[in-house]
Amino acid sequence: MRRMPLATVMIFLALGGLAAAADVTVTQVAASGSGGSASIDSRLGDVKASLAKKFTFSKYEFLSRKSAKLEEGASSTWKLSDGNSLSVSYAGASDSGGSQTLTLTMEIFGESEGRRKTLMKTTIRRSKGQPLLLGVGKMTSGATLILVIKAS
């Protein structure tokens, strides 16, 4: 039986701490109005300060929150409140100065005449647990759809 050198075992143990899978959560928010102090739905408490800092709407309404556990290379697709869809793929994790950075590829797409039409596609790197706030566009209600995407 062949034994692995101690240095090899230590490398395997160190890499074992990187995220082999990511828990991805997508929260949909309807934002409307302007001016005055912001009224933020209590279900958005974990991103309340970020919403008020990044956007200037006066009302933020929770629409939905869905999660998926993604193995490296896997993806999940969510239907958005504006009629489009969001696909998120997990590309892996890296150690960056003692904190984990997760890499996600995101695509927002719609359907037109039975064909998929990409509206936006990007790759992001975020610290584990750090939310990404993305203003997507107008919904039929006139409110602006904001996505809060968090991977941990």
Image: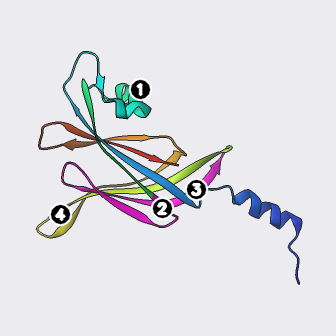
Residue 111 is tagged as 4
- Mark 4 Cα shell of 10 Å, populated few (<14), some (14-19), many (≥20): few
Residue that label 1 marks: 49
Going from the N terminus, do you reach mark 3 or mark 4 first? Answer: 3
Majority secondary structure in the magenta region: strand
Rounded to the nearest whole Å, what is the CA distance between mark 2 and mark 4? 24 Å
Query: What residue range appears in magenta?
Result: 69-96
Q: Residue furthest top?
A: 36
Going from the N terminus, do you reach mark 2 or mark 4 first? Answer: 2
Q: Amino acid at mark 2?
A: Leu
Disc 3 versus disc 2: nearer the observer: 2
Going from the N terminus, do you reach mark 3 or mark 2 first? Answer: 2
Q: Amino acid at mark 4?
A: Glu
Left or right for 68, reference 93: left
Q: Note whether 47 is above or below 35 in the view shown.
A: below
Left or right for 61, reference 6: left
Going from the N terminus, do you reach mark 3 or mark 1 first? Answer: 1
Tell me the element at label 1: helix
Residue 12 is tagged as none
Q: Nearer the viewer, residue 42 or 125?
A: 42
- Which color scheme did the rendering employ for the protein? rainbow
Q: Residue placed at 49% from the left, 67% from the top?
A: 73
Tell me the element at label 2: strand
Tell me the element at label 4: strand
